[in-house]
Image: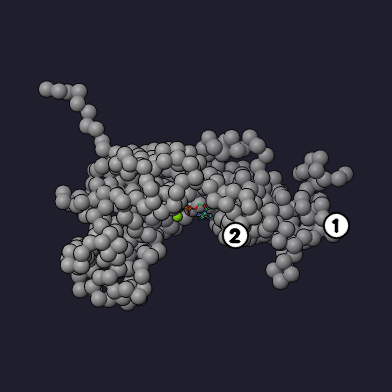
Amino acid sequence: MAATTVPIRTALIEAEHVSKSFPSADGSTLHVLDDVSVTLHEGEVVALLGKSGSGKSTLLRTIAGLIAPTSGDIRYRGTPLNGANPGTAMVFQSFALMPWLSVQDNVELGLRAAGVPEKERRQRALDAIDQIGLDGFESAYPRELSGGMRQRVGFARALVLQPDVLLMDEPFSALDVLTSENLRGELISLWAQPDFPTKCICIVTHNIEEAVLLADRVLVLGSNPGHIKAEVPILLPRPRDRRSPTFEAAVDRLYAILTGRDEKSAAERAATPGPLTHPLPDASVGGLAGLVEIVYAHDGQSDLPDLADELSFEVDDLLPLVDAARMLGLLEVEGAQAFLTEVGRAWYTADIQRSKEMFAGLAVEHAPLVKTIVKALENSNDGALRDDFFRDLLRRGYNAEDTEKQLDIAIDWGRYGELFDYDANTGELVLSEVAAALTSTLMDGDAEG
Ligand code: ADP
Ligand code: MG
């Protein structure tokens, strides 16, 4: 017997050294993907897991041939792409249906584009509609359907093409919990059918449990710019039980990787952290206080996935809060465990005025954008600056939406710590006296004596 035979997995799609940049409004460049290599094989479900903004959608669109990489190659069955990838079909988070077309016509759209004759088109669409449980809704319009039904149309429209590789961009994240769980189950059953024509599924998600539920292999993307941080095989048999210890262990492991520091940012950390390299996590002071309070109530130590469960959050909903708490030194994370630091404990147990002062100190020390704002205000003539000044600075590293978000977070943090005040009507940020006193002690050398 040839005991040495190793099954060779057929590569369907190879992305090699893919980088992608976008020009931003002011002429600078936004690096979204950095040297990403991914191979999708026959017979596997691959999840691309990453935080919001890590470039997941960009990577998936590049694989689909909807956008071209800035550098690097994408091949489908060995042939470099020249435009749309003929071996793929895509399911979008937003469903992306044509509102003026019936279910039947929406599903037929791709076949029409491919020049499939009408009779065959009709029949294939009917089969796909049937397969995905939309039987009887052929002549309905998207607006007449629930979100779950609309996404079924999104599925049917992709499946009717019988793609080698089904690409899905957060297909369940716009749906309620029950509906998304049903659809996930149906996707798993379709995949298990021996005659299912699709040979590979690649699903983008920011949901750790979804990745563990569906994937044979999880590629974790790190951010700024997007890169592959880790690859984790999920060897659990199907159907998978979310409550099993092995399932939970896989969730914990991915959680640790996702929250863990990666080499990229280690290199970045060597440089002075700035508002463009170290974005503020999207967390309000109220949210931070809530998290710290809960960990405190758990004797200063919590398992994050358990905590998320308790609060009926998806485990990744906690990530920005956890990131913010770590940035400020309130929590430490080891694996999937969060620990309250001494500082965190002191902050939580202090009276309100003291806790504001502490927060001001931590924010100026650890939150680069807050520090930048305080320094700029100090250096201005009258301790006041328009928000547009900071907006322009942020635009060099963020898109319009993220710029606003960063500014909102910094203002929330700064106001809570009474470092500065903000008048939304005039758009003016004004330094407080507290800040002036505080920063002269913290920013050694920077402040005048
Ligand atoms: P994810 O899907 O992981 O949330 P995306 O791939 O959508 O991330 O986006 C990653 C980054 O690239 C974001 O900062 C986003 O604003 C930026 N980006 C995505 N598409 C474009 C584009 N067409 N032009 C400019 N910036 C873009
Ligand atoms: Mg996305």
**Label 1 lies in ligand 1 vicinity (Cβ under 8 Å):** no
Residue matched to label 2: 400
**Placement of 4 over or under 214, stated as above or below:** above
Please state the total of marks drawn on the protein image: 2
Query: Could you tell me the amino acid type at mark 2?
Result: Ala
Residue matched to label 1: 381
**Label 2 lies in ligand 1 vicinity (Cβ under 8 Å):** no
Return the x and y of residue 185 as percentages of the image width and height: 26, 56
Return the x and y of residue 272 as percentages of the image width and height: 67, 39
Is residue 284 visible in the rendered image? The answer is: no
The disc at residue 92 is none
In the drawing, does residue 352 fall left or right of residue 30?
A: right
User: Element type at marker 2?
Assistant: helix
Q: Residue at x 79, y 60 (%)?
A: 384
- Residue density around tag 2, few if under 14, some if 14–19, many if 20 or more, within 10 Å: few
Q: Residue at x 66, y 45 (%)?
A: 274
Cα distance, mark 2 to mark 1?
28 Å
Taking depth in this image into account, of 350 and 70 the one nearest to the observer is 70
Taking depth in this image into account, of 243 and 216 the one nearest to the observer is 216
- Residue density around tag 1, few if under 14, some if 14–19, many if 20 or more, within 10 Å: few
User: Element type at marker 1?
Assistant: loop
Closer to the N terminus: mark 2 or mark 1? 1
For the C terminus, give its image quadrant.
top right
Task: Tell me the colour scheme of the image.
Answer: one colour
Return the x and y of residue 411 as percentages of the image width and height: 67, 59
